[in-house]
Image (cartoon, rainbow, N blue to C red):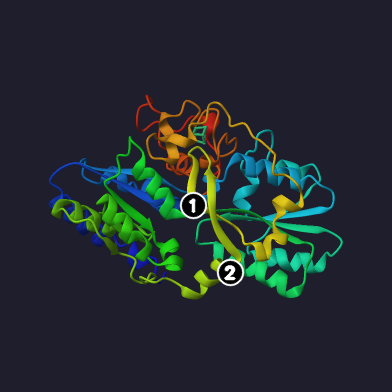
Amino acid sequence: MKYLDEYRDPALARRLFTEIRTVTSRPWTLMEICGGQTHTIVRQGIDELLPPDIRMIHGPGCPVCVTPLELIDKALAIAGRADVILTSYGDMLRVPGTTTDLLALRARGSDVRVVYSPLDAVRIAGERPDREVVFFAVGFETTAPANAMAVLRAHALGLPNFSVLVSHVLVPPAMTALLDAPDCQVQAFLAAGHVCAVMGWAQYEPLADRYQVPIVVTGFEPLDILEGVLMAVRQLEEGRAQVENQYVRAVHRSGNIQAQEAIRRVFKVRDRMWRGIGTIPSSGLALTDEFAAYDAEARFAVADVTAQEHPACIAGGILTGTRLPTDCAAYATLCTPRTPLGAPMVSTEGTCAAFHSAGRQPTGQPAGQPVPAAAAGPS
Ligand code: SF4
């Protein structure tokens, strides 16, 4: 398939592995930011095939995983109202809140619908003026332009029954928080190519400079990842700390200016709570005053909803790259894709789901054994 097969070529992959081995003279620790990259790395076994001196740790780039539990509970509180149609991308439906999830709520009669675009939610609002239609707007900078366009569209159509529950997070402040952490082990980043396709990569230059950390904008296919690793290791070996762009087929330095303008018009930057990590300054988006009327949190008065994480879940350590899913006592036993205790086991971009679908064993279980039968689920 065009644009896929040429980035999965085994002969080129072998060549890149050899080149990485050749340039590596000492141990380095790299973090891939995006959960999509994590899935490629784990599914293809790239982390196990790299030279032992190259350690890949998995970053917080799964937007579903870092959505705070409070927001899931707020979505549940809103969806439970008889006058509401709650719309969302499918991933969010199975993310557990404190006591239940949106899928279970739907089974009990709530009107919860999966949409493929926020504009579908706007269309539903137009068709059902008798109901409040809420879109659960989750994501990084990647999905923010479409969600901004939905608000602009609802505004242009004069739809008073449309609102958004906003849970947008921004990547550079999260990287800053990781680098500021006293136990930070990251020596180079593979930045998320799709985020940079929207925002460009100029905003990463002050980070590379200030922390002397190489940042390579990287795509999602196996050869993208291997080339990104090679470029990062080369920089580390040569003592350079620059932003480089591996994903040249999709990313320009300045990004998508029109998309950025839509984001700026509808959203403003605010402090944001990241699930398992805590509050990161200036790391989220909220509606600007001009569009505050579309804020579902204010419309349904759910600002004081609080939440309780499952005590077994170590998602914070997973999302900061300091722990592996296999370190979690609940991994593949209590927590499986069928019975997730935390968001990283639900989302297709979650690290725990990536480990489970690749059959990675819980710590202490010999390699080559199947993932415990009771735990095996669709993935
Ligand atoms: S395996 Fe489940 S309980 Fe453990 S960290 Fe991952 S999501 Fe949380």
Residue 291 in the image, given as x and y percentages of width and height: 67, 64
Residue 43 against residue 374 in the figure, above or below: below
Residue 308 in the image, given as x and y percentages of width and height: 62, 31
Residue drawn at the location 56% of the way across and 60% of the way down: 268
Q: Quadrant of the N terminus?
A: bottom left
Q: Residues within 10 Å of mark 2 (few under 14, many from 20)?
A: some
Residue 150 in the image, given as x and y percentages of width and height: 65, 67
The residue carrying mark 2 is 265
Residue 25 in the image, given as x and y percentages of width and height: 12, 46
Place residue 129 in its image quadrant. bottom right
Residue drawn at the location 42% of the way across and 71% of the way down: 255
Q: Residue furthest front?
A: 289
Q: Is mark 1 within 8 Å of ligand 1?
A: no
Q: What amino acid is at disc 2?
A: Arg
Q: What amino acid is at disc 1?
A: Ser
Q: Distance of mark 1 from mark 2, alpha carbons?
A: 17 Å
Front residue of 126 and 339: 126
Find residue 282 and name its label. Answer: 1
Q: Residue furthest right?
A: 130
Q: Is residue 102 visible?
A: no
Front residue of 147 and 366: 147
Q: Is mark 2 within 8 Å of ligand 1?
A: no
Residue drawn at the location 44% of the way across and 61% of the way down: 195
Find residue 2 and name its label. Answer: none
Front residue of 224 and 283: 283
Residue 360 against residue 270 in the figure, above or below: above
Secondary structure of residue under mark 1: strand
Place residue 26 in its image quadrant. top left
Q: Residues within 10 Å of mark 1 (few under 14, many from 20)?
A: some
Q: Earlier in the sequence, mark 1 or mark 2?
A: 2
Residue drawn at the location 58% of the way across and 32% of the way down: 309
